[in-house]
Amino acid sequence: MKQDFVLPSEAYLLNHSVGRPLKSAETHFKQSYLSPWQDSGREPWQAWLAIITEFQQALGRLFNSSSMQFCPQVNLSSGLTKLIMALPELNENSVVLMSAQDFPSMGFAMQKALPDGAIIRYIPEHKDITKIDVWQQHLTADVDLVFVSQAYSNTGQLAPVNDIVKLAKANHTLSIIDVAQSAGIIPLNLTDLDADFMIGSSVKWLCGGPGAAYLWLNSKHIERLAPKDVGWFSHENPFEFDIHHFAYHDSALKFWGGTPSVAPFAFASHSIDYFSKLGDKLRKHNQDLIDLLIQHLGEQVVSPHDRNHRSGTVIINPKMGVETALTECAKDGISIDARAHGLRVSPHIYNDESDILKLLAVLK
């Protein structure tokens, strides 16, 4: 599927950071966003709002859920903050469980959004969060909310999300799933999972660019939650224009807020629609290329070797050293990066064996 994407001449393996755009994205953006603005003398809001509907519908197809359970957000931190502040269960005595490996921004948002006195417990960084028994040790009966990253960006690990949600339900603990590192590459059926909430973005594996994040609410929570961070697009009728009357939207859009950005969602809806039609092809292709790296590098691959425990990103601690490897890869036109545990490499649907072999030639 290389022909569908705008690709550089280099071997681009940075898909854990930003995915490559579709060639058709520019034309779609002009038709859906610019044309109603440039080519008409009428205000473009009705056409622009149709973009948001398309975004919700594309997410519904990707995650097998009703489109009305998705609310656009500018980023995950904003979505998480709005959600935490709207949960009546959380008070000064509440306990939240996270992992020390979660993306720092999620921890920052959680710390500031929680009521004073509430505490966050962290599963220690050295614990293997791919194992459900680790979660069982920490997800105790006094935990009110558990935050789970489906995939972890710095370790290439995959959390046992289904088992964690079942455990949370048994403990009467609310669950939030973060799919920022996994949306598009790790299949997730929200109807079957039946978690309480989910947050995600479009910039990585979905190749939709930044600014098109989303919040998903289990249908059982939509009516009961009353977000505090609202605006006219949280209203059941944004165009009512009565300052004395506010009524929440009857869908997840009650978490939307004020005048929305639209352009990022024009790019993202088009891209998400593309990937929603691939099924598990991307996951299988990605894992086959990771297997090739493991076959040649062995224990230099420090992320999980078991497909059931690994995400779409492989972490490599090369014998030549991380800094030397980065320098040599840059010389050979290979785009990767590094974190504390080593090089991060993420092959997408448009990468192939030649990209992997080029990387192996440098590392070996």
Image (cartoon, helix red, strand yellow):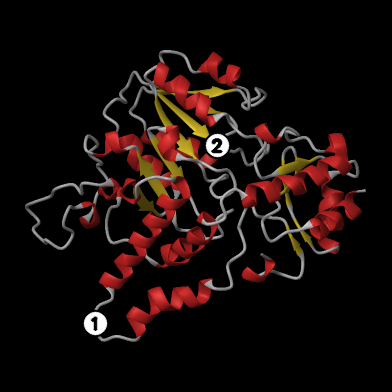
Query: Residue at 30% across / 49% down in the picture?
Result: 68
- Viewer-proximal residue, 280 or 14? 280
Name the residue: 24% across, 49% down. 230
| Residue placed under numbered mark 1 in the picture | 42
Residue 150 got which mark? 2
Task: For label 1, count other residues whose C-alpha is less than 10 Å away and answer few (under 14), some (14-19) or many (20+).
Answer: few
Figure quadrant of residue 22:
bottom right
The answer for how far apart the CA atoms under marks 2 and 1 are is 44 Å
Query: Residue 125 — which label?
Result: none
x and y percentages locating residue 161 in the rendered image? 53, 31
Q: Quadrant of residue 4?
A: bottom right
Quadrant for the N terminus, please: bottom right
Residue 77 vs 49, above or below: the answer is: above
Vertical side of 121 occupied by 16: above or below: below
At label 1, the amino acid type is: Arg
Q: Does residue 236 appear in this view?
A: yes
Place of residue 210 in the rendered image (x, y in percent of width and height, measured from the top left): 50, 59
Residue 91 pos. (x, y %): 30, 24
- Say whether residue 64 is left or right of residue 231: right
Residue 97 visible in the picture: no
Q: Residue furthest right?
A: 364
- Rendered residue at 37%/55% (across/down): 56
Q: Residue at coordinates 15% horizontally, 63% vertically from top-left?
A: 239
| Amino acid beneath label 2 | Gln
Which label's residue is closer to the chain start, 2 or 1?
1
Most foreground residue, 264 or 171: 171
Helix, strand, or loop for circle 2?
A: loop
